[in-house]
Image (cartoon, rainbow, N blue to C red):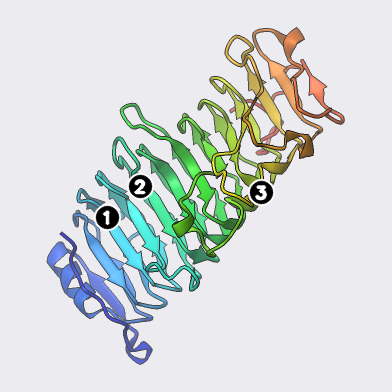
Amino acid sequence: MFVGILLAGNPLRAAEVKVSDRPGLAAALRGIASGDVLKIGPGEYGGGHFVTGIENLTVEASDPDQPPEFTGGKEAWHFSKCPGLTLRNLRCRGQSGNGINLDDGGRREQPVTGVTIEGVVVEDTGPVGNFDAIKCSGLDGLIIRSCKIQGWGGQAIDLVGCHKVLITGCSISGKPGFSQHTGPQFKGGCEDVTIEKCRFKDAGERPIQAGGSTGLDFFRPPGAKYEARRIVIRGNVIEGGTCACAFTGVDGAEFTGNTVRGPEKWIFRMLQETREPGFAPCRNIVVKDNSFLFERAKVKSEINIGPGTSPETSRFEGNRWFAADQPDRSAPVLPVEEKDGTYGRPPQPAQSGDTSTDTFSE
């Protein structure tokens, strides 16, 4: 059951509000106003908290070293039409639907702007089915920073029609017993999304999915003819998963400076799941300066290319490929010729003080 019905507040009465228990949180939510800073003390608060129509709200732990826990319920938090929202140092666990849900209230031509999610932990969402750890619909200028996601049903982070997004420094790992269809997914008209400096461990069938399959009534903006475009995936470490990344109906993506270890079946997938008239085929993908460590016994084909795609528009340059079990078979079969690739050389150990993702050592 949700607690708190909120109406737009008066920014002139913005205040710092401190709570230390669930009744106190319920009371605070009934009177919260735009511009307020809600500081929540350690302890368990349950799930089911709903906020709508509040601008420039901050919800954060009063003590970052002892974050409040929001356990159970269908959703931990649902924020609708809350521009300027900041969520910081919260922990959500065991929701049966979505962990955190943020949306534009269905106003597809009026995106919610300026949301930041920082230092948030979302665990054990679902566990099976289309249930997301963090779900965002119609957000522009979104930042997700230094968050931890572990165990989910559908997507670790599901972005539908979001633009100018940065996901940085996050840890995303799967757990046994959770269906974990994809890690971060960008679809439904997403544009200008960057995911960088993140670490993935066994993060599902598609640890990163650039694009997807979206009903036409959910695209933002309405009438967009691409699932996603201008997607940048850089400087991440991706370990395990059926593949490292699936490009699905994406019109322009860069996969650069990443380290991929131990994919189970493919390294990439190029797919076209939305086939409505006028939609761009999956195309214009740049794969550059990455390191791929895999086993030829598992990876028979580096790229799974589906029908309706345009793989000839892709570009591969300066990547390092190493089949640990059969080094002489490290060279990949690609849809276009690679420029300046390196094949069959074992990875070099990291130099002292080197924190780059170019090597395969921990």
Q: Picture coordinates of residue 185 (x, y %)?
A: 51, 45
Residue at the location (87% across, 29% down)?
A: 340
Question: Which badge, 1 or 3, comes first in the chain's sequence?
Answer: 1
| Left or right for 271, reference 13 | right
How far apart marks 1 and 3 lie (CA) works out to 36 Å
Q: Picture coordinates of residue 77 (x, y %)?
A: 29, 59
Residue ranking furthest to the front: 277
Structural crowding at the residue carrying mark 2, measured as other residues with C-alpha within 10 Å and reported as few (<14), some (14–19) or many (≥20): many
Question: Which residue is tagged 1?
Answer: 76
Disc 3, SS? loop
Question: Which residue is tagged 3?
Answer: 280
Amino acid carrying label 2: it is Val
Residue ranking furthest to the bottom: 12
* Placement of 121 over or under 310, stated as above or below: below
Disc 1, SS? loop
The quadrant in which residue 348 appears is top right
Residue at the location (40% across, 51% down)?
A: 134
Residue at the location (66% across, 42% down)?
A: 282
Amino acid carrying label 3: it is Ala
Report the disc number at residue 139. none
Q: Are the two marked residues, 1 and 2, in contact with CB atoms closer than 8 angstroms?
A: yes
| Left or right for 18, reference 274 | left
Question: Which badge, 2 or 3, comes first in the chain's sequence?
Answer: 2
Amino acid carrying label 1: it is Ala
